[in-house]
Image (spheres, rainbow, N blue to C red):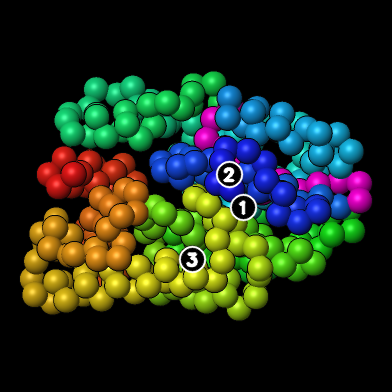
Amino acid sequence: MEYTKDLHEVTENVHAYLQPDGSWGRSNAGLIRGTDSALLVDTLFDAPLTRQLLATMSPLTAQTPIEVAVNTHGDGDHWFGNYELPAGVDIIAAENAAAEMRHLTPQALAALAEAELEQPMRDYLHRAFGSFAFAESGARLPGQTFTGRLELTVGGTVVELIEVGPAHTAGDVLVHVPSARTVFTGDILFIGSTPLIWAGPVDNWIAACDTILGLGAEHIIPGHGPATDADGVRAVRRYLEYVRDQARQRFDAGLDVPAAAADIELGEFAGWLQPERLVANVHRLYREFDPELPEANKVELLGLMAQFHARHG
């Protein structure tokens, strides 16, 4: 599948909407069609992007209108566009994802982006989020939540929702279409960009990769980056295992988080976008190793990444 910003046919009734280059906020979405209705996998980071997404899908949704949308997790680039969906569309997410959504709305992110912040945080947030129109987006939360597994039938097409979080976030969900041998993974998979452990534990995320592999899907659509296959899943799994093991060595040696992250050689993963996410991942791993260490929220983790990027590029 070509990696261009467009709606790409995966199978006759499954399409993936891809957004290069997969960096901050450039997330993917999907459309699963049945005989008379459709399911949307994720909306996008702001209102203009989501309007463009819906307009691009409109030749297909004119015949099979969107009946339900699934948000794969609580990061804004996968749900802030909910506000642009028709009023009758049901929105579903994991219970833990919906809880996260209540705390980081488009308005909260817009306020953060406009706040008087010190360097290097100000420049980092501008580079990551400055092109998005958060002020134009409203907060529309899912009306239905679930835990574990949920099976839907959309126009005769069976869709399986499989909760695999907490991992990347508190409530990550895979969207599996068995008849099409397709799975939309949300941010359990970053292809070509560095995974980010907002929540953990990392072993849950590794297990989520194994769950994807166990589905035997031929078509794997990540939350960010180009469509992939089992090799792409294994690469993400290797990154998580490698960073876990490298962080453990430095934790045992007494290095603090910034020093540990600076000391880790990324090797095969060095070419992935946003390598500075390593420092946030090390922080989360240190808390797994010692739960008595201070917690950090997402804004504080962004601050760590901004400082790391400023020092190490």
Is residue 125 placed above or below 64 in the rendered structure?
above
Question: Residue 304's x, y, as percent?
Answer: 21, 47
Front position in the image: 21 or 173: 21
Residue in the image at 38% along x and 26% along y: 130
Question: Residue 45's x, y, as percent?
Answer: 52, 35
The C terminus - image quarter: top left
Q: Name the residue under label 1.
A: 1
Question: Residue 169's x, y, as percent?
Answer: 46, 56
Q: Disc 2 on helix, strand or loop?
A: strand
Q: Disc 1 on helix, strand or loop?
A: loop
User: Answer yes or no: do the residues labelled 2 and 1 have beta carbons within 8 Å?
Assistant: yes
Q: Name the residue under label 3.
A: 232
Q: Earlier in the sequence, mark 3 or mark 2?
A: 2
Residue count near mark 2 (Cα–Cα under 10 Å), binned few <14, some 14–19, many ≥20:
many
Q: Name the residue under label 2.
A: 18
Residue in the image at 65% along x and 27% along y: 51
**Which residues, given as a range, are shown in magenta?**
35-47
Residue type, mark 3 in image: Gly
Q: Earlier in the sequence, mark 2 or mark 1?
A: 1
